[in-house]
Image: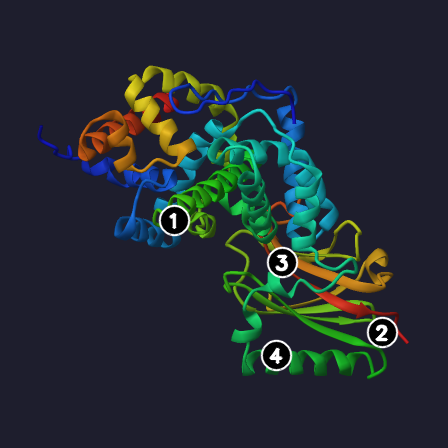
Amino acid sequence: MTDELDPIPEDERDDVLAAEYALGLLEDAERDAARRRAGAEPDFAARVLAWEARLAPLGNLAPVPPPAAARAALHARLFPDAAPKPFWRRAGPWQVLAGAALALAVAVLLLVSFDRNGGGGPLYPAEIASEAGDFRVIAVVDKTRDEVVLTRTAGAAPPGRVLQVWAHGPDEPAQSVGLWPAGETVRLPLPPEIAAVRGTLTLGVSEEPPGGSPTGSPSGRVFGTVDIPGVGPSS
Amino acid sequence: MGAVSATDGRSGRRDRPAAPSGDVAADRAAIEGYIARAALGERAAFTALYDATSGKLHAVCIRVLGAGRDAEDAMQDAYVKVWRNAGRYRATGHSPMTWLITIARNTAIDRLRARRGDADVADYDAALAAPGATPEQSAVAASEAGRLVACLDELPADRRAAITGAYLDGRSYAWLAAEAGVPLNTMRTWLRRGLIALRACMAR
């Protein structure tokens, strides 16, 4: 019995490869090559995603509730401490990568904010960075003025989209702080609920349609969040 | 999530996707909201997401790995990825259940292959990192559950078995070929033709 692989028409090759990749049928060099293409070529990535969507109904089975112990174990794994703690892990390896540029950006922002608030109240610097490292923002919360100043150091909203800033306190629902339609820096007053937060203040940035998210929660990609512990009242 | 029909098919039996629940749109909006808020680090939203979807993800893991500790661990691993990647959900253009099921399926298959000692398998992260999916794609997903079943039914039985075997049992080409008693490239040709036919049918 001969064992020949029938050739695939040229215009089907990418889609068949995307399907094989989505199914996990590729091995070794073929798999690695497909993975690189999925990360680099929007067209190929869209094909992989389309296959995931086509095939996902096969995994849509009748629910089997997991034991309560699994829920508790997952919580213990993700949230090891009862008290909120910074999600530094979620911010990825930015600490390692951030160098002199970051330090300088923070210093400049601090100076700007410090200057404005007259040197009185507490300032809380933080960085929001995407896991992929393609988007970074330095944020400084100024509790004297109850403002946050944000500066982009990498990345931007996609064309035709705007940035939106979100915040929440410990175990509180996130709310919009404001839109960041253009520019490298934006200064936003904190909404009263956010100004009232004591303890860990979480800031996040997403990309949204012009005018902001229509849903009250992020509707686009959330680039990242940062937890700022120990936020207190202005003195 | 709505009540759905149960089918556990070990190899040989058909795997029928569950029927859609009665209030798909409301479920979907709620789950998307949980994912969006989880992306901002809201633990309560993540917990709500877990409570609304863990039965489904657990079922996928059981289907791939069999009931027990491995399936529970795989489900947990899947939710760790969900928590860490929630901000990237929108970029995939998937419906929320497609996104969650794909993560659970890939995580369970990874574990299955590690158990078998096979080589590492496709990394879902590569697809998640990929930009460029359009919102229209996700709209397609909801209506595709029924269509997938109909289109799988149009395929020859051996090709249908190969596709479900690859998706739910993590079968490699070599394994599928041995199981069907055909040479490897014959299986690869079958499966590729089956996939092209499946896509054409679902696009009708």
What crowding class fits label 2: few (fewer than 14 Cα within 10 Å), some (14-19), or many (20 or more)?
some
The amino acid sitting under disc 4 is: Ala
Quarter-of-image position of residue A9: top left
Co-location on one chain, circles 4 and 2: yes
Label 4, label 2: how far apart the Cα atoms are: 21 Å
Front disc: 1 or 3: 1
Q: Which residue is mark 1?
A: A42
C-alpha span from label 4 to label 1: 32 Å
Q: Which mark is residue A105?
A: 4
Q: State the CA–CA distance, disc 1 to disc 2.
A: 45 Å
Q: Earlier in the sequence, mark 3 or mark 4?
A: 4
Residue ID for mark 2: A144
| Colouring scheme, one of rainbow, by chain, secondary structure, one colour | rainbow
> Which residue is label 3 attached to?
A181
Which residue appears at 67% of the width and 36% of the height?
A67
Q: Chain of mark 4?
A: A
**Which of the marked residues, 1 or 3, is nearer the chain's N terminus?**
1
Where is residue A139 drawn, in percent x and y?
Answer: 68, 69
Tell me if A163 is positioned left or right of B195 in this view: right
Q: Secondary structure at mark 4?
A: helix
User: Which tag, 3 or 2, sits closer to the chain's start?
Assistant: 2
Q: Chain of mark 3?
A: A
Residue at position x 19%, y 38% from top? A10
Secondary structure category for the residue under label 2: loop
The secondary structure type at the circle numbered 3 is loop
N-terminal label among 4 and 1: 1
Given the image, on which type of amino acid does mark 1 rest?
Pro
For the N terminus of chain A, the image quarter is top left
Q: Is residue A150 left or right of residue A195?
A: left
Instruction: Count residues near mark 4 (Cα–Cα under 10 Å), then give few for <14, some for 14-19, many for 20+.
Output: some
Picture quadrant where residue A124 is located = bottom right
